[in-house]
Amino acid sequence: MDMEEKEIEYPKFKESMVKTHTILIPNMLPIHMSLFEQVLLQSGYKVEIMRNEGPDVVSEGLKYVHNDTCYPALLVIGQFIDNLNHRDDLDKVVCLITQTGGGCRASNYLHLLRKALIKAGYGYIPVVSLNMSNLEKDSGFKYTPKLIFKLAAALTYGDLIMYLNNKCRTYEKEKGATMALTEKWVKELSNQFANGKGTSYKAQKKNCYAISKSYDNLDLDLSHKKPKVGIVGEIYIKYAALGNNHLEDFLVSQDAEAMVPGLYGFMLYCFWNNIYDTEIYGRWKKKALITKFLLWFMQRREKIMIASMEGTKFTPMKLFKETKEMSEGVISHGTKMGEGWLLTAEMMELQEIGYENIICAQPFGCLPNHICGKGVMKKIKSLHPDANIVAIDYDPSATKVNQENRIKLMLAIAKERIKEDDKAEL
C-alpha cells in the first residue's frame, strides 16, 4: 500500500444519516436475518436485507476481488455491487459488513469492500463495520441496551426456528406446512418486537415453548428412517444459500434430513476464545471478565431454547458448554483462527446426537477449515468408526453438479447403512 492510498479519507456513516439512508445487509441466515431486519427497522434504522442471487453476483465479485481471496468475500462484495448496479437511490445507501477482528481473512472484508466500491465507481458510499472488537469506532451505528436485548432475543428465536424447521421439512405430510409455520412465527415475533414485547427472559421462555409445541404438532411421517446429515464449515458457506448452492434445499430434495448447528455456537465460541486468550496466552484479562458476564447472559437463553424441546418428538442439540468439551483430545482450544476448534467440536457433537453423516462446507483455500475440518477427520473417524464425512469445496470454479454428485455418493452410503440396519433388526 503506497502513501497516497494510506491517506484516503473514506466516507463515514454519521448519526445524521440514520433516518435518511438505507443500510444494505448481506443475507446469510434467512430466518435470523428476517428477525434482525425487523429489530433494526423498529430501532429507527432503515435497512434492507439483500436477497439478490444468480451468476451476476459471482461475476461482479470476480471483477473486484482476487479469486485467491476468500470465496465468501467474493460473494458478499459481488452481492453489494450487483445490488448497487440496479438502484436509483445511490446517494442514500450505506453498506454494512461484519468483522470478527481475528486473524481470519474475514477481518479484511471491510477494506476489500471499500476498495471494490472505489473501483466500481461507488467510492462515495459509506461502509459500516458491525463488530465487537472496537473497530471503526466513529460509526453512526450505535449499540444500545434495548437494541442488544432485541438482537439477542432474535438470535434465540432464529436458532430454535431454524433447527425445528430443518427437523420437520423432510417428514411433513402436507408439503409446505413447515415453511408456512416458520413464516407465521417470524411475523408473530416481529409484531411482538414492534409492540415492545418478546425480549424479556420470561417472554422468551414462553415463546420458545410455544414454538416447540407448534412444530411438535405438525403432521409428520416418521415411519421411515432417512439419512440425517449435519452441515458444518466456514460460517458464511455453512449458512448462506448463496454460498452453498442451497445445500439444505438440495438435501431435502434427496429425502434427507438436514441439521445445521445454530449461530449461538459461533457467538459462544467467540466469547470462550476471549477466556482462552487469558488462560492460554495471558492476554485480555479485563476483557475476560466482561466476557464471563456475556456468557452467563447468553447461556441462560440457550438453556431456554434447549429445554423447550423436552417432551417433544425432537432430539435437542447439546448445551454449548458440553459441545466445546467434545473437541478435547482432538484439537486444542488454542486453535481459534476462523471457526477453529468450533468446527471440530460441532462434528463431534453431531456424531453424539445421531448425525453420523456430515458435510464440511468450506471455501477453497480456507486454511482454518482445511486444518480444523479436513485435518481432524481421520481422528474423528477413529473415535466414531461409523462417521460418514465429506468435505465439499465452494469457489467460483467449482461446479454445482460436481458438488451435488459428491453429496449424492455420501447419501448413497448413508441409505445403504439404513437398509443394513433394517435387515439386522428383522
Image (cartoon, rainbow, N blue to C red):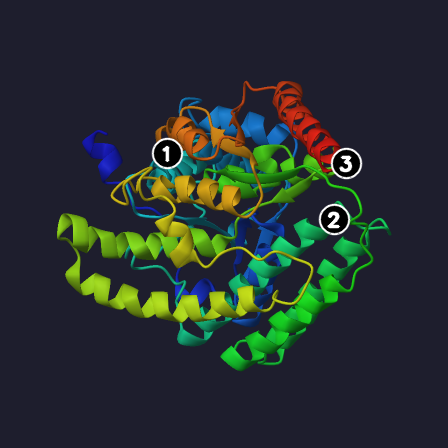
Asked if residue 4 is positioned above or below residue 128 in the image, the reply reads: above
Amino acid type for the residue under numbered disc 3: Leu
Amino acid type for the residue under numbered disc 2: Arg
Cα distance between the residues tagged 3 and 2: 28 Å
**Residue 128 in view of the camera:** no
Cα distance between the residues tagged 2 and 1: 30 Å
Residue at 23 percent of width and 33 percent of height: 4
Label 3 sits on residue: 426
> In the displayed structure, does residue 364 sit left or right of residue 401?
left
Name the residue nearer the viewer: 159 or 113.
159
Name the residue nearer the viewer: 20 or 56.
56
Say few, some or many: other residues with alpha carbon within 10 Å of mark 1 (under 14 / 14 to 19 / 20 or more): many
Asked if residue 8 is positioned above or below residue 305 in the image, the reply reads: above
Mark 3 or mark 2: name the one nearer the start of the chain: 2
Name the residue nearer the viewer: 318 or 247.
318
Please provide percent x and percent y for residue 208.
61, 70
Residue at 60 percent of width and 37 percent of height: 242
Label 1 sits on residue: 372
Name the residue nearer the viewer: 383 or 324.
383
- Label 1 or label 3, whichever lies nearer to me, is 3
Label 2 sits on residue: 169
